[in-house]
C-alpha cells in the first residue's frame, strides 16, 4: 500500500500570530513585513529554500515563508517562554499529523490521474519535438564534414552574410579560421592543404575550415534567420 509523508511546517504568518498572541494589549504588534526581514537576515536560515505565498483577507497573493521545526524554533528563541512553548507544541502536533499514512482510495485515484496527465503531456511534447529531434539526430549522425561554402548551399544561406555574421560573433577570425574554442566543441575541423607560393616564390601554409555534423546543427540553429531552417 502506498503511503505519504508531509514535512511539518508553519508559515511566517502563523508565527507572527503566535508571537503577537503573547504580547500585552498596549504593546506594539509585530508586523509580518518586519518578521520577513528577520528571517532573511538570520545567519542560520537559508530563507530562499522556504519561500512561499499566502492569500490575505483581500484575496491578494503575498510573500511568506513555510518553515520547518528547526527554523521556527530559531526564530522564536528571543521571544518569551510562552511563545516558544506554543511553537514547540504546534510543531509536535503538526509532525504527528504528517506521519506516514496509507493513502485513501480517493488519494490513490487522484495520484493515478495526475500521473496519467503527466504521461499524456510528455507524449504530446515528444510528438511535437519529433521533427526537431529527427533533424538533430540526422545532423549528428553525419560521419563526414563539409566546407562552409557547401554548407551554405545546402541550407540555402547567403555565403557572404553567413561569413560576416560568424566573424561578428567571434566564431571565425578574419582569415576565416575558427576560434579554438569552437574547434574544441567539435563544431569545426581544420585541414592543412598543400602550401602555396606567392608571386615572390615564398611558400605559405594553407588551411581549409571544415564544418562537422555538430557544427552544422549549431550553425543552423544560430543562424536560422539566414538559412530559413526551423
Image (cartoon, helix red, strand yellow):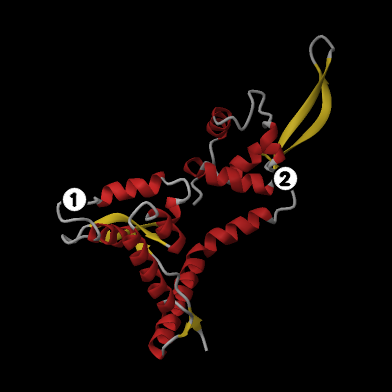
Indicate left or right for 43 with 36 as reference.
right
Q: Can you give x and y, in whole percent of width and height, for residue 123 in the image?
A: 49, 72
Q: Is residue 66 left or right of residue 149?
A: left
Q: Of the residues under marks 1 and 2, which one precedes in the sequence? A: 1
Quarter of the figure with residue 212: top right
Viewer-proximal residue among 82 and 91: 82
Q: Which mark is residue 106?
A: none
Q: Is residue 226 above or below residue 13?
A: above
Marks 1 and 2 in Cβ contact (< 8 Å) = no
Q: Which residue is mark 2?
A: 145
Tell me the element at label 1. Answer: loop
- In the picture shown, does residue 164 fall above or below 79? above
Query: Mark 2, residues whose alpha carbon is within 10 Å: few (<14), some, or many (≥20)?
Result: some
Q: Residue at x 59, y 29 (%)?
A: 170
- Residue 97 position by quadrant: bottom left
Mark 2: which secondary structure? loop
Residue 18 horizontal/vertical position (percent): 28, 62
Residue 220 vs 77, above or below: the answer is: above
Q: Which residue is mark 1?
A: 27
In terms of depth relative to the viewer, which is nearer, 197 or 94? Answer: 94
Residue at the (42%, 46%) spot, across then down: 42
- Which residue reaches farthest top? 200
Q: Residue at x 67, y 31 (%)?
A: 179
Q: Quick check: 111 above or below 222? A: below
Q: Name the one closer to the observer, 135 or 70.
A: 70
Q: Quadrant of residue 215?
A: top right
Amino acid at each position: 500500500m502506498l503511503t505519504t509523508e508531509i514535512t511539518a511546517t508553519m508559515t511566517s504568518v502563523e508565527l507572527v500570530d503566535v508571537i503577537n498572541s503573547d504580547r500585552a494589549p498596549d504593546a506594539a504588534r509585530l508586523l509580518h513585513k518586519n518578521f520577513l526581514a528577520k528571517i532573511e537576515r538570520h545567519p542560520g536560515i537559508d530563507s530562499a529554500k522556504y519561500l512561499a505565498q499566502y492569500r490575505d483577507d483581500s484575496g491578494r497573493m503575498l510573500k511568506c515563508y513555510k518553515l520547518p521545526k528547526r527554523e521556527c524554533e530559531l526564530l522564536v528563541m528571543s521571544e518569551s517562554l510562552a511563545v516558544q512553548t506554543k511553537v514547540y507544541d504546534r510543531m509536535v502536533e503538526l509532525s504527528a499529523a504528517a506521519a506516514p499514512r496509507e493513502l485513501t482510495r480517493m488519494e490513490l485515484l487522484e495520484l493515478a490521474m495526475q500521473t496519467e496527465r503527466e504521461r499524456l503531456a510528455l507524449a504530446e511534447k515528444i510528438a511535437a519535438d519529433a521533427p526537431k529531434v529527427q533533424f538533430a539526430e540526422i545532423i549528428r549522425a553525419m560521419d563526414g564534414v563539409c566546407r562552409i561554402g557547401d554548407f551554405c548551399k545546402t541550407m540555402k544561406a547567403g555565403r557572404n552574410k553567413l561569413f560576416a555574421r560568424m566573424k561578428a560573433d567571434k566564431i571565425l577570425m578574419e582569415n576565416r579560421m575558427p576560434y579554438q574554442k569552437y574547434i574544441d566543441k567539435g563544431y569545426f575541423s581544420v585541414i592543412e592543404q598543400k602550401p602555396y607560393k606567392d608571386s615572390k616564390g615564398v611558400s605559405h601554409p594553407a588551411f581549409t575550415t571544415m564544418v562537422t555534423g555538430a557544427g552544422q546543427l549549431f550553425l543552423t540553429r544560430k543562424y536560422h534567420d539566414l538559412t530559413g531552417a526551423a
